[in-house]
Structures are given as C-alpha cells and as structure tokens.
Amino acid sequence: MKFTVADLLDQLSTSSVLPLAKLEKGLALATKPEKQQLRIGLDALARLGLVEESEDGLRRGDTPDLVAARLRCSSKGFCFALREDGGEDIYIRDHQLNHAWNGDRVLVRITREGGRRRSPEGGVQCILERHTTSLLAQVERQNERLLAVPLDDRLLTSIELPEGDASFLEPAEESVVEVQIDRFPVAQFTPQGHVARSLPVHGGEAADLDLLLTKHHLHERPAAPRATLKPLAAKGRTDLSGLPTVLLGGWSGSDAPGLPALSLEEREEGGWRLWVHSPAVAERLSLGSNLDTWLRDQGEALCVGKRWLPLLPSTLAKAAYFRSGESNEALSVALELSSQGELEHYRFHLSVIQPAGMVDPAVMEALAERKPKARTVPAALKSLKDQVPMLEQLVTLAGLLRERRLAAGSIDLDLPTPPLESLGDLCIPAPDAAHRGWLVELPDTHPMAMVRESLLLAHRALGNHLAALQLPALYAVNPAAEASEINEVAKAALALEIPMELSPDGNASAAELAAAFAATDRGRALQQQLRDSLSAVQLSNEPGPHALAGEETAFSPWTCPGLHYADLWNQHVLVSLLTDGKDRPTVRHKTSVELASDLCHGSVDWALLTPSQLAPYQESLERGLVQRLNNRGRFLSEIHGDALAMAQARHAEPLVGQVLPGVISGVQSYGFFVEVPPSQVEGLVHVSSLKDDWYEYRSRQNRLVGRKSRRSYMVGDIVEVEIQKVDALRHQIDLAVQQPEILEPIANDGGDEELEDNDDDEQD
C-alpha cells in the first residue's frame, strides 16, 4: 500500500473538513486501485471512530480513549505499549495484539487500570504504521511448509515462503536472507513473504554494514528530490569576516555533517562575547517544499561507523557547509557572558564569516602540550598561530561552562564508546544534547567539548527567545529523573557500601550519585545503572525544562541543521523572525524594537508574523511532526546500539575459548552479565553454569549468593570468564565463570541479614 493509517490521519484535522479529492492529492494517489484502497481504509477507520465523513469531506474523529503508542516485545512473549504522551507503559497480552508486531505504531484502548506495582493493561485497536516491512531471517522447512524464521526473536511469528525459495535452505552459519513482507497476518491467515536476496554472515566489515542497513531498512534509501536552492540575499547580513573564527571537529567519516564555527572576544567590562555560527541551511529552501518534506522524513543524519548516511543531499551540503579561508553565509548568535560564565544577553544575526582553519584533536593535543610563553609554535598549530590565544580562552571558558552546567544538575558519565576501529565516528560523541539524558565525559581540551558547551548556550538562548515572543518552536525537553528510579540506584550503591549523602527528604541526587560513583572502583557498573534511570531528551512543541543543559524554561536546538531536522525547522522560524518579523505595531510608529535581541522581551504586544507566514509551521505541528521526529530519534539510538553490539561481537569472535578478566555489570535471578575489556563486550553467565553451589538471588543487595559456600557475585566484582560462544547476528555472548576452589561452608548463626531477605529468587 502506498500510504499508512498514520499518513492518512496526519492529513486530517479534528477542527476542519478536508474534501476527499484533497485527501487523495495529499496522499499522492492517482490510480483507481490506490483510491479503492483508500476507500477501504476510510470505511474501516470510520467503524473505529477515527474518521468522520460527511458530504463536505472528512475530519478526524475525537477518540480520547485511544492511546497512541509503540509496541515493545520481548523474546519471552511479553509486550508493552510505550505511550507517545509519556504516560505509563501498557501491558498487552498476546491475544490482544491483533497481529501487531514489535516496533509497530498502534492505537491502544486501556481495558484495566494500573495499580500499585502493576501496569495498566490494554488491547491494540488499530495499527497506525508497520515498523517491519522486511527482515533478516533463516529459511527452514517445518511440517512440509517453507518458513522464514526472523533473526529478531522479538518478532513472535514466522513468515510463509513460496516453494521457489527452497534454494535458500543453506546452513545458517554461512548466510541469512532478506525477506520482503508481501502480506501481513489477517484474521486466520499467516504472514507471507519472499526472499529478496542472500547475505553472507562472515563477509567482513562491508558485509556487516550491509546486514545492519538491511535490518533497519536503510539499504535502499529514497533519493532526494531535485530542487533549485534559493540564493541568499547579501542585504541585511552582518559582515563578521574580520572576526577571528575557527571550525572545530573530530568526525572524519565520509559524508560527515558540517558543524558550527566559534569565535570569542573579550569584553571591556569583563567576561566574553561568544559567537556561535551555524551553516545557513534554512534560507536555501522553502518550508513545505518537496525537498523539505523529504528531509523531514529522513529526520537525522545517521552514523554507521566509518561512513554517514547524510541528512542533507550533496548539493545542499556543498552550498551550506563552512570552508576554511572562504566567505561563508551563516546564522550567528552573539552570547554575552559574565566573567563567571553566566549568560547575560544575546543577539541573533544573519551573517558572513570567514573561518581561519579547522581545529581537530591533533591541534588541541599540540595546544595542550605547548609550554606556557613558548616562543616556538608546534607544527600542528602553525596554520592557526594567530588564533592560539583565542583557543586557550575557549578551553578556559569551556571548563567554566561545564562547571556551571554540572552545578545546575547536568550529568556527565565516564561511559565512552569503546575505541574499536570499525566503529569510526561512533566513537566520537555528538556535540549536542540530543536524545540521551546524559553526556559523555570529555576533557575540556577536546574539540567536541568546546563545541558542546557553546551549543548548549546557543540553544538555551533561542528557546528563551522564541518562548518569550510566543512563536512556534520545537523545544527539546529533558525533565529530571524520577526520584524513585534514582533511589533504586542509590539502594544498589548502598548495598555495595558506597558512601553517599541523601537529601533532607531522603531522596538521592542523580548528579551527586554520578560524582560518588566516579570515585569508586565499581564506578562504571554503577554509572551504567544510573544511565538507565535518566530521562531521555524528547522534542515538544511546548517549552519545558532541560535538566541536561541546566535550563529551567525553554531549549530549542538550531545550530546543527545537517545533523537533525529539528535544528533545520527551528532555523526556519528564526530566519522568518529576522527577515519578516514586524518590529513595530504599524508603519506609523517611529520607534521599533530589536527583534533579534533579548532586549525586546516584554515590549512586543502585536503579531510578529502574519497568519499566512505562520501557517506552514502550525500545519506541520498539527500533522504530528514532533512525534515523527521523536520516533526517528529512537530509531537512531537503535541503529547505533546495533552497530556497537555487532562490532563488539566481531571483536569477541577470535577470543572464543580464551579466559579473560571481566567486570560484573548486572545481576539477575537467572545469572549475571560481565563486561570484558577492551571492547566492553557484555555476555551472560547463566546461573545454571554455576555448578559449585545452589545460588539464590538477593534482590535488595543485587547479588547472587551460594547457599553453602556463601560465595557471592555482585555488581562491580572482577571475575575470570571464558568466552564460550558468540552469535554476532543476535548479539549474544555466552560466558562461563572460572570458579576458584570450593570453600568450606561457613556456619550460619542466624545473624546473616542476607538470609532474612524475603525477595529471594532461587536458582532454576
């Protein structure tokens, strides 16, 4: 089908009627079969109350009892609907799935409200959008039927294949197949598909990349539509070409996104004027154009190791990205900072800059090793020798801004991506605070650290500006973590006798836990638990706090339009304000306000943009832009997680049979997980492999304890493990712990508090 239910509903509004002909045009339906499919879909949606039809056209039905969510299933058959509004997850029993699969976007009706320690329950009423249109599988013959068994065991089904695909019955160790879904399950009919191609399992890095892209349906990305870029007007631009400016970076993969440039000036009254210059992308295309719609569907630039799947097509990237030694159009902000790093004022500009050169990790390493007052300039710094004083001040300012951010409750964790060669640019953290609720700890001399602290300030400035002027915006919100989640991590730390202080109300602070964990020899494992309890960054069309940036009011990303579509969209709003905003109520008023500066806040009581100028922004928000971009962000996180897991598994394959030291990263009733350096690959030691004793799970102490020997395994312990089996495709590593000589049982006088734990789960 050419469209999904989500596509159809996004075209409709609850407040206005849309004629059927306009709906067909909006969905790009031209043929009679396509229009017949639409008719079938409308009839079904009308029965569910999702669509109301009259002689004038169609409108979206008001269905407050239906909750939009995305399904997350486990290999054990447990499924939850993760609500798009951020509410509590809904448990879906298998007979209530109604043929929905893991990852599908669905509408759920709650059938049983939740209670204490129990999730609400519900059933799937409508599948808005299928997540899996093709999959990786192994071909098997079962009861004379030819089936494709998905590699992803969260897909709780098999796909029926035509007999002509029997030629793909090859050993699973040699290859897997890509299966295209021809028919999803309907009523009593099972899903059907066909084999599109075979992919090798052990074909090297290029083959692994193909497997990754195929798994996530990225191997056949749609080409960008042809578009003529708009010329940029020179009038109204601030000439900053004489301002010392540098590009900072660290990414080296092919098609890597361009990053902002930085300038720094000392103010006469003390403090700094920090300039952040973003590539002028929004000015080159119209909001709502074919190219803009295509960019909106892509959502993100995707790093897949040594190469990128870029967001911007090559013609747009070539025109917009900065080049050293040349004049470049930019969208800039001047951030006025006190000597303590406090943001006092800001002003936005359409500008022209001329960067002096690129500051990469090699340049910063030479700067760090350079002796104070040295007369000679290292070779790596010669091309930037005039900018050395500014770079030194940028390092100082980055450290000051980081201290202020951490003092405001932001979280830095020492959990970098392991430096595996095949991961390429994935080892270098992005400079913004997108998606995750924490930041990778970086030294102040790292180029990305300087960019990061600068961008957080620039995004705070735009968020506050657009909120104060009541203009449409995409805000990034990051509420503080739930106290109950943080307290669970604190309990685990206290059980390990990690010293810490609680607040007067008895709750733990995430920032204080991060600092306490960093000072212990079990820090990494505890930081991982803290990481999992932090709230992720989400987009919203309403302003809100952004704990990660230390911002309490509003935070709008805009400086990385080649990395995230949300930044590009906010750039459109900012450009509209700077070029079309009314700076006075009427032309008869002689006094105007400076709309580009925060000094205008509180002085504007008129409409800054006309209804026709606001319409494209309001229309895109009404059609679910925020949710689509949030879904795309989660999709990005899944891809990065899969790329990392694949690289780690490949690194572990030659180590099968070897005994290596590792660190216990998690403990469950069925066993414990161990991280093995240097790739930090994580594998499971199943409790059934512990033959020396009968082990019980002490949930309050987060450990396994032997009944007779009292030997325990808990988070942060160093253990010797043998790598027994590696399944790179499923990212599963089987480990066996090397146990020391069995100790004599220790007599129990009844005072062992661990035996008084009532939450024990015994070994299966």
Image: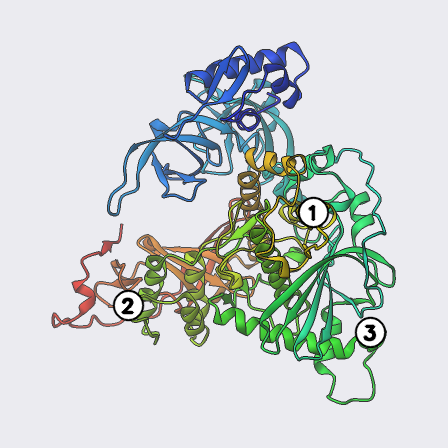
Which sits in the foreground, 73 or 57?
Answer: 57
- The residue sitting at 80% across, 70% down in the picture is 244
How many C-alpha atoms fall within 10 Å of the one at disc 3: few (<14), some, or many (≥20)? some
Whether tag 2 and tag 3 are in contact, CB under 8 A, the answer is no
Residue 634 image offset from top left, x and y in percent: 53, 45
In the picture shown, does residue 140 fall above or below 618? Answer: above
Position in image of residue 727 (x %, y %):
52, 47
Left or right, 522 with reference to 586 = left
- Mark linked to residue 581: 1
Examine the rendered structure and indicate whether residue 217 appears above or below residue 164.
Answer: below
Q: Which residue is tagged 3?
A: 384
Q: Secondary structure at mark 1?
A: loop
Q: Give whichever of discs 1 and 2 has the lower sequence position.
A: 2
Q: Amino acid at mark 2?
A: Gly
Report whether 52 appears left or right of 350: left
Is residue 204 shown to the viewer in this render? no
- Label 1 or label 2, whichever lies nearer to me, is 1
Kindly indicate the quadrant of the structure image that contains residue 693: bottom left
Estimate how packed mark 2 is, as few (under 14), some (14 to 19) or many (20 or more) residues with alpha carbons within 10 Å: few
Q: Along the polypeptide, which appears first: circle 3 or circle 1?
A: 3
Q: Secondary structure at mark 3?
A: helix
Percent x, y of residue 255: 75, 50
Residue type at the position of mark 1: Gly
Q: How far is mark 3 from mark 1, CA to CA?
A: 39 Å
